[in-house]
Amino acid sequence: MRRISIFGATGSIGRNTVDLLERQGGREAYELVALTGGRNVAVLAEQARALGAKLAVIAEPELLGALREELAGSGTEAAAGPAALLEAAERPADWVMSGIVGAAGLAPGFRALRSGGTLALANKESLVAAGPLLLAEAERHGARILPVDSEHSAVFQALVGEEIAAVERVIITASGGPFRDWSLDRLAQATPEEAVAHPNWSMGQRISVDSASMFNKALELIETKEFFGVAPERIEVLVHPQSLVHALVGFADGGLMAHLGPPDMRHAIGYALNWPAREALPVARLDLAAIGRLDFAAPDETRFPALRLAREVMTHGGLAGAAFNAAKEVALDHFLARDIGFLDMAGTVEDTLARLSGEMRLGAAALSLEDVLETDGLARRRAGEIIARRNRRQMRG
């Protein structure tokens, strides 16, 4: 029986993963080693009971009592906090979903690779902040990493049977989010509620805002470089409002291989879960005649500077990705708290990178996960200082 763990089980990726497992036999077909969640005790306990999980971990220690109460009599062990999360990641599993959002997913992903199984990677920050280290860790333990972002799953599938040396370019698509046609003046007034209202995808709050600001696509640019070893100048972004073409791979002979599918994360998750086989999945089948047209446009990097910043990060290399992601997460927190405006997020990230460039060698290679986490912490402090200083100026002015 295949051993499975899901990190970030209560988020959108985790819930879709649980849905697929239940459809493919649930506890009769899989041994659920561990499930982890953020704060949603009720959902985590329900998932653990349904799948017969051996361990359920809630991120917040103060919620441990509530989790134990929900799991009473189920046979599932309850635990809480960062140490418990890392202990769960060290339990041997054949297939692990890395669905925790943000830098919080870094350490559990590294620990999970030690089992030598498959890491289904939805935590793009792992590759952005520590790509070379993560890939080296997988090789060290004979583990495999499969991409779960819809764009990178699409690229992975388009490359089956192909030589990476024959790849001329990789094109990842972006829906453009809810603000793709907004002016700069209007963007400056955008609210968190408007940013969360994604037109095509049903996602969590943070990733929805990242999509609206194009920071999600910026992270995916860096992720493409790290995962597939493609030179930055060969990676392109196209705005595709329908979200049906997830990526295209161009080859040396001029041909383009495109991957199309509905905007449903269960496709990419299911592909990673069943790989190398293809199993039937409960996703819509495209009716291209009914769809009628597919639209594409170049992204506007003036309104969405996150893409330009990502290219600068790829040029720097080294620890720049860790700093970029950390500053982005801090800026996102402050936008959601209404401390800064929508456009201030990119300004905060750019200012943080500029400040750190004067304090350290951003292009220096990370020698360990500790180097990455140290850079992450420093970037968070600097981003916080930049926001506080900007807000003080605004109050005085």
Image: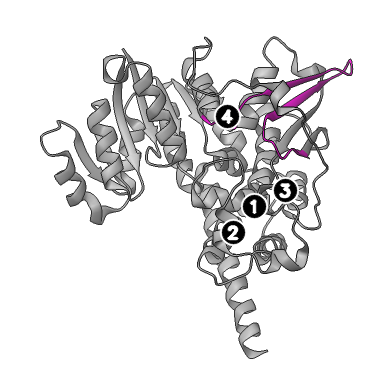
Measure how far apart labels 3 and 4 are at the Cα level: 20 Å
Q: Secondary structure at mark 2?
A: helix
The answer to whether residue 269 is above or below residue 312 is above
Q: Secondary structure at mark 1?
A: helix
Quickly name the residue at label 2: 194
Quickly name the residue at label 3: 310
**In contact (CB < 8 Å): disc 1 and disc 3:** no
The answer to whether residue 297 is left or right of residue 130 is: right
**Label 2 environment density (alpha carbons within 10 Å; few <14, some 14–19, many ≥20):** some
Give the residue displayed 66% in from the left and 69% down from the top: 189
Which amino acid does the dot numbered 2 rest on? Glu
Camera-nearest label, 3 or 4:
3
Q: Earlier in the sequence, mark 2 or mark 1?
A: 2
Quickly name the residue at label 1: 212
Specify start and end residues of the magenta stretch as a single range: 238-265
Q: Earlier in the sequence, mark 2 or mark 4?
A: 4
